Amino acid sequence: MKKIAIIDDDPDILDASGLVLKSKGYDVVTAANPEDGYQIVKENKPDLIILDVMMNEPDDGFFLAQKFRREKIFTPILMYTSISKASGMDYGVNELVPVDDFVEKPISPDQLIEKVEKLLHKKEVK
């Protein structure tokens, strides 16, 4: 069973995403802040990380993704964002934002499963 870590400060997002993923047979661990998120990733070694951009600070997700990569944690990261809607800015994957894919919140259950399966398959192929 694949394990997915969801790190987001919105309890509704944690609950909804967790329910969708558990219904598809995934094991899910969650955290509501970057510090706890870092711990669950280190302790659980998930197959995929779903990470919110904005938590306590507007860029917590970016800093946490960078920290994972600096520590040689290369688990695929799907980043939840609503930044482009709020700021008009569009973010892409690059060295400063070391994630594998972005998705705008809110996300439909079908889109979430599609993104998760794509990133897990990509990890298996490597």
Image (spheres, rainbow, N blue to C red):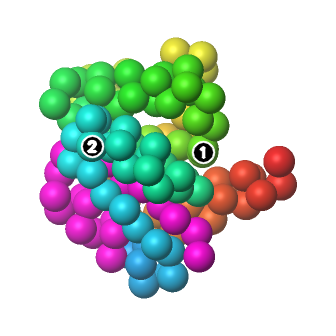
> Which region shows up in magenta?
1-19
Camera-side mark, 2 or 1? 2
Residue 79 vertical placement versus 83 (above, below) = below
Asked whether residue 114 appears in the rendered view, the answer is: no
Judging by the rendered image, the residue that carries numbered circle 1 is 76
With 58 as the anchor, is 5 left or right in this view?
right
x and y percentages locating residue 18 in the rendered image? 34, 69
Residue 62 vertical placement versus 3 (above, below) = above
With 117 as the anchor, is 42 left or right in this view?
left
Asked whether residue 122 appears in the rendered view, the answer is: yes
Judging by the rendered image, the residue that carries numbered circle 2 is 36
Looking at this view, is 97 or 81 the one in front?
A: 97
Identified at 52% across, 65% down, the residue is: 3
Residue 4 vertical placement versus 67 (above, below) = below
**Which residue ends up furthest to the top in the rendered image?**
96
Asked whether residue 49 is drawn in magenta, I would say: no
How packed mark 1 is, by other alpha carbons closer than 10 Å (few <14, some 14-19, many 20 or more), is many
User: Disc 2 marks which amino acid?
Assistant: Asp
x and y percentages locating residue 4 in the rendered image? 48, 61
